[in-house]
Amino acid sequence: MKILVLHSDIGDNAPPEELDTLIAADAVAEVLSRRGHKTSQAPFRQAELEELLARTAPDIVFNLVEGVDGQGRLAPLAPQMLADLGMRFTGVSARAMAVTNDKPLTKSMLREAGLATPGWAVPPNWAGLDGGQWIVKSALEDASLGLDDGCVVAGPQVLARAAACAAKFGGGWFAERYVEGREFNIAVLDGRVLPMAEMRFEQWPAGKPRIVGYDAKWEEDSSGWRGTVRAFGVERNEPELAAKLKSACEQVWKLFALSGFARVDFRVGEDGVPLILEINTNPCISPDAGFAAAAQEAGMDYGTLIEAIVSAGPP
């Protein structure tokens, strides 16, 4: 096949979460070429997309566009334009991406469908906010933007924290009930739940929030990076919990009309109930990332995983 690997347009001095998109694009293009496909790579630029497709004439576009102009909330522009131009592409539809990118909207839909998710409060009235512990999050951006050691605050501090984050990063911010417990990041490939990964917090500094924050994902010399350890085996060791997690992932897949590949993040408190935190419809698929690790645990090498994403086809 002729495959165009389309990625975010990364500028000079881009932060590591954006540079990671280029690492993934290079890896995907390389492995597809080794498997006999004719591949090309290009950044997504709205004004040039139609000409790019005419010039490269791909059979399918491997969509790795995670943001436009550095804004994750604009990522759905790529699948929408591809669909409008009649082009086949990997991953989810623009609608599914736009809905799941909106965390408060996602949580509302989960709650309405009877799926468990931590409580939340949004501006301007912040209904439901109390004096407990809350984690202040970007409403529309991903990559753990703003999730540092100060993001977990008591209720009275939420508004100040949200205002500070808006001033620093822009965009809208909301508060989600902080759940002290275990974290699971679960990869789903074409509707199939892959071996489930728990992110364990080992040798964790006292007083540091137990979250997979920005440092844990992107700062290799940080305590967060060193202390978050991926572990598999919940299916074997805790089959009842695994069954709950798997069922929730399958319901999420149907509820949001997902396709291709996605990741569902959970928190499990002392009561053993899996609470859905977020749904990432364009998770990192670099060879060293969690999705590839889950595929490997399932017996799939990296090339087989990428080929499977291509074979899953368009939304």
Image (cartoon, helix red, strand yellow):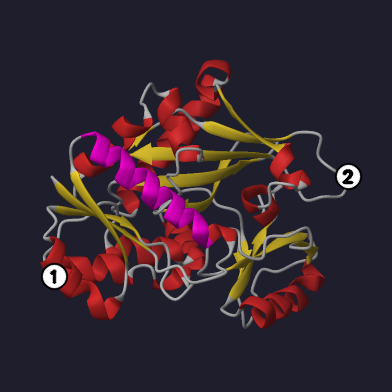
Image spot of residue 97 (x, y percent)? 36, 62
Quarter placement of the N terminus: top left
Residue extending furthest top? 236
Image spot of residue 62 (x, y percent)? 27, 53
Q: In this view, does 235 lie above or below 34?
A: above
Of mark 1 and mark 2, the one earlier in the sequence is 1
User: Which numbered dot is residue 206?
Assistant: 2
Amino acid type shown at disc 2: Ala
Q: In this view, does 86 lie above or below 281?
A: below
Q: Residue at x 25, y 51 (%)?
A: 90
Alpha-carbon span between mark 1 and mark 2:
53 Å
Q: Residue at x 87, y 49 (%)?
A: 207
Between 133 and 115, the one lying in front of the other is 133
Amino acid type shown at disc 1: Leu
| Front label number (1 vs 2) | 1
Q: Assess whether residue 254 is covered by the magenta stretch.
A: no
Task: Identify the secondary structure beneath mark 2.
Answer: loop
User: Which numbered dot is residue 85?
Assistant: 1
Residue 88 in the figure: left or right of residue 147: left
Callout 2 crowding tier (Cα within 10 Å): few <14, some 14–19, many ≥20: few
Q: Assess whether residue 31 is covered by the magenta stretch.
A: yes
Q: Which residue is drawn at 38% across and 39% down?
A: 188
Residue extending furthest right? 206
Residue 84 in the figure: left or right of residue 288: left
Task: Identify the secondary structure beneath mark 1.
Answer: loop
Residue 10 in view = yes
Callout 1 crowding tier (Cα within 10 Å): few <14, some 14–19, many ≥20: few
The span picked out in magenta is 18-35
Between 194 and 11, the one lying in front of the other is 11
